Structure formats: structure tokens, C-alpha cells
Image (cartoon, helix red, strand yellow):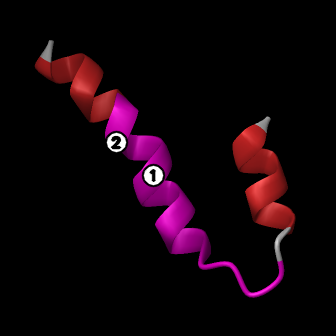
Amino acid sequence: MGTASVWLLPGFDKSRLVIISEEPTQNEIGK
């Protein structure tokens, strides 16, 4: 839900959000 509000922020770089949401996924694969 936190990321959803980030998308609503004006001028926010959506590409950054994609990287942020991919980070935890990569960490899980590393485990």
C-alpha cells in the first residue's frame, strides 16, 4: 500500500519505483 501512494506523488520517477519493488524479490532469490 505504501508503494501505491508513491505512484500518486506528482513528478515521481516511475522507473525508480520499479527498481525499488524488484530489490526485495532479488534478495529473496539470493536466500
Is residue 21 part of the magenta span, yes or no? yes
| Badge number at residue 2 | none
SS at mark 1 in the image: helix
Whole-percent x, y for residue 25 in the image: 35, 30
Main structural element of the magenta stretch: helix, strand or loop?
Answer: helix
Would you place residue 6 above or below residue 21 in this image? below
Q: Which residue is drawn at 34% across and 42% down?
A: 23
SS at mark 2 in the image: helix
In the displayed structure image, the side of residue 20 where residue 5 appears, left or right: right
Label 1 crowding class (10 Å Cα cut-off): few <14, some 14-19, many 20+? Answer: few
Task: Kindly identify the amino acid type of the residue bearing the numbered disc 2.
Answer: Glu
What separation in Å lies between label 2 and label 1 (alpha carbons)? 5 Å
| Badge number at residue 20 | 1
Look at mark 2 in the image and give the residue it sits on: 23
Label 2 crowding class (10 Å Cα cut-off): few <14, some 14-19, many 20+? Answer: few
Quadrant where the N terminus sits is top right
In the displayed structure image, the side of residue 3 where residue 17 appears, left or right: left
Task: Kindly identify the amino acid type of the residue bearing the numbered disc 1.
Answer: Ile
Answer with the quarter of the image where residue 19 lies. bottom left
Query: Looking at the image, which residue sits at the far left?
Result: 30
Mark 2 in CB contact with mark 1 (< 8 angstroms):
yes
Is residue 16 part of the magenta span, yes or no? yes
Q: Residue at x 50, y 57 (%)?
A: 18
Whole-percent x, y for residue 21 in the image: 49, 44
Whole-percent x, y for residue 27 in the image: 24, 27
In the displayed structure image, the side of residue 9 where residue 15 appears, left or right: left
Answer with the quarter of the image where residue 6 lies. bottom right
The magenta span reads: 10-24
Would you place residue 6 above or below residue 11 in this image? above
Would you place residue 3 above or below residue 10 in this image? above
Quadrant where the C terminus sits is top left
Whole-percent x, y for residue 13 in the image: 59, 79
